[in-house]
Image (cartoon, helix red, strand yellow):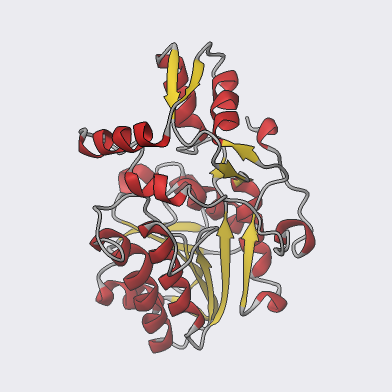
Amino acid sequence: MKYDILLIGGNGFVGRVLAAQLQAQGYSVLLPTSHLAAGRELRMLPKVYLEDADVHDFDELQSLCERIHHNGAVINLVGVLHDKPATPYGKVFKAAHVDLPKNIITAMQLHGLKRYLHMSALGADSNGPSMYQRSKGDGEVAVKASNLDWTIFRPSVIFGAQDQFINLFSKLTKLFPAMPLANHQAKFQPVSVDDVATAFVMALKMPQTIHQSYDLVGPSVYTMKEIVEFAARKAKASCVIIPVPAFVGYLQAIAFEFLPGPTLMSRDNIASMQLPNVLPVTGIDALSEVFGISRRSLEGMK
């Protein structure tokens, strides 16, 4: 069977919303994952087919591309947030943000596929202050150098019902009566997962988006402190936010990196916050001006 869309990285927060929107628009979706058990809600979507596959294995990747219609599309949502310190970035960032896009490009070329939608990040820059930003920047360079009909999306922090940003802070503010917060003045322009997914779906039928990069942001700019305060209100928690100097945050990040379980904050995350994660002064509000989307606000988050 041939599918309309190969959705790589589709078993995550953004992918689940996008898969549902793609199906609603009539697309058949092939969604490879190495975590089938985590995709139970996706199995309820009749036009979305989950397959146990490792997209980092080139043979498996090109086999997946072979099953996509000639006029279909490949969407890459893969992104990781943490890696061990290295220059210009570590092995995990390289594999996910640089090597995988290159392999996708090669696999698509082998099977005559042209349309490619790529998830990058606001602030992606090969010379950026963090490993995350540098690896995302190098991924963009590879995409732009290809002969594919590519479109790049660069969202700010993405929020939604199942996000791991706002909801994480909501949980923390419920657990602790006070929270020390470094980089409290770092700026973000959070964007709704529904709006991001809608832009991806719309781009599939908008040839004018080919060979374009779009910054995706919400309607308002917030400081880190304001975001954590919002998360506390959402959780109905009475947690006092205590701004602390940057060096304290750096020490906290080192401690978090060595604790068991998921990393809450890393030194690389702090490096990323050196630059405002907001729409550049000369940037275009793509959601409104290109896709005609009325952007959802953080305050409307359910």
Question: In this rendering, is residue 77 above or below 180?
Answer: below
Q: Is residue 55 at all visible to an observer of this figure?
A: no
Q: Is residue 139 above or below residue 184?
A: below
Q: Name the quadrant containing residue 105.
A: bottom left
User: Vertically, is 210 above or below 123?
Assistant: below
Q: Residue at x 47, y 85 (%)?
A: 146
The image quadrant where one finds the N terminus is: bottom left
- Residue 154: give x, y in percent of width and height: 56, 61
x, y percent for residue 233: 60, 19
The C terminus lies in which quarter of the figure?
Answer: top right
The image position of residue 273, as x and y in percent, is 48, 47
- Which residue is more in the foreground, 94 or 38? 94
Q: Residue at x 68, y 31 (%)?
A: 299
* Residue 129 appears in the picture as rendered: yes
Identify the residue at horizontal 30%, vertical 49% (top origin): 35
Residue closest to the eye, 256 or 48: 256
In the picture, measured across the screen, residue 142 lies left or right of residue 21, that is left
User: Residue at 50% of width from left, 14% of height from top?
Assistant: 239
